[in-house]
Amino acid sequence: MMNTYVHSMSEKPTRERILDAVVELHEEVGPADTTISAIAERAGVQRLTVYRHFPDERELIRGCSAHWSEQNPPPDPADWAGIQDSRERLTTALQALYAYFEAGEEMLIQVIRDEEKVPALQEVLAPFWSYLVEIAGGLSAGWGVVGETQRLVRAAVGHALRFGTWHSLRREGLTNEEAVRLMTDLVSGLVRPES
């Protein structure tokens, strides 16, 4: 079995083998604890070969991010943008986002944890944080509220979109469906007229 794995690894282009190794190590130990030696060993190449393809940490992190994102694209906001009902739109968005979080959980835990330790990660993650802010803006609109209530809706939607929120709810034993319902109810509760 191991010989089959080594043989199939050697058939891949060197750059792809290196990127596969980086992705695996980032998921297992995190970017901060991934070494060039470990990458080279996992990819079956020499350290100099890694440096030839990725001369510095920034290029390595960017390459890993692009490689992983190509295989794990985030949900497309166009999938829910046309939904007129605000609650249904939020539910649809959260279902897609929480499924994405679940599929990429190992990587997201490690990368978010190491963001402050690895400056190159901050650059790579900036577009993802902007993506979430943009989604939050769209999902906060159309609830028919203004002023303080609109500010609270925006905060609740932003909270619902965070990986940390999803992860915490999952650790409490909620399924994705239950987490979506809870977060949608939280936002909807802010806009209900008082009896």
Image (cartoon, rainbow, N blue to C red):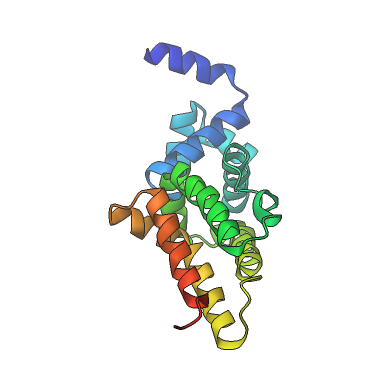
- Residue 32 shows in the view: no
- Residue 47 shows in the view: yes
Seen from this angle, which residue lies furthest bottom? 147
Left/right of residue 30 with respect to residue 64 in the rendered view: left
Tell me the residue at 36%/48% (across/down). 175
Tell me the residue at 57%/41% (across/down). 72
101, 160: nearer the viewer = 160
User: The C terminus is located in which quarter?
Assistant: bottom left
Give how far across and how far down residue 33 sits, in percent: 40, 50
Give how far across and how far down residue 35 sits, in percent: 44, 45
Tell me the residue at 47%/54% (across/down). 111
Give how far across and how far down residue 118 sits, in percent: 50, 60
Seen from this angle, which residue lies furthest left? 172
Left/right of residue 161 with respect to residue 62 in the rendered view: left
User: The N terminus is located in which quarter?
Assistant: top left
Exactly how many numbered labels are in the figure?
A: 0
Give how far across and how far down residue 148 sits, in percent: 55, 87
Residue 76 drawn above or below residue 190: above
115, 134: nearer the viewer = 134
Seen from this angle, which residue lies furthest front? 195
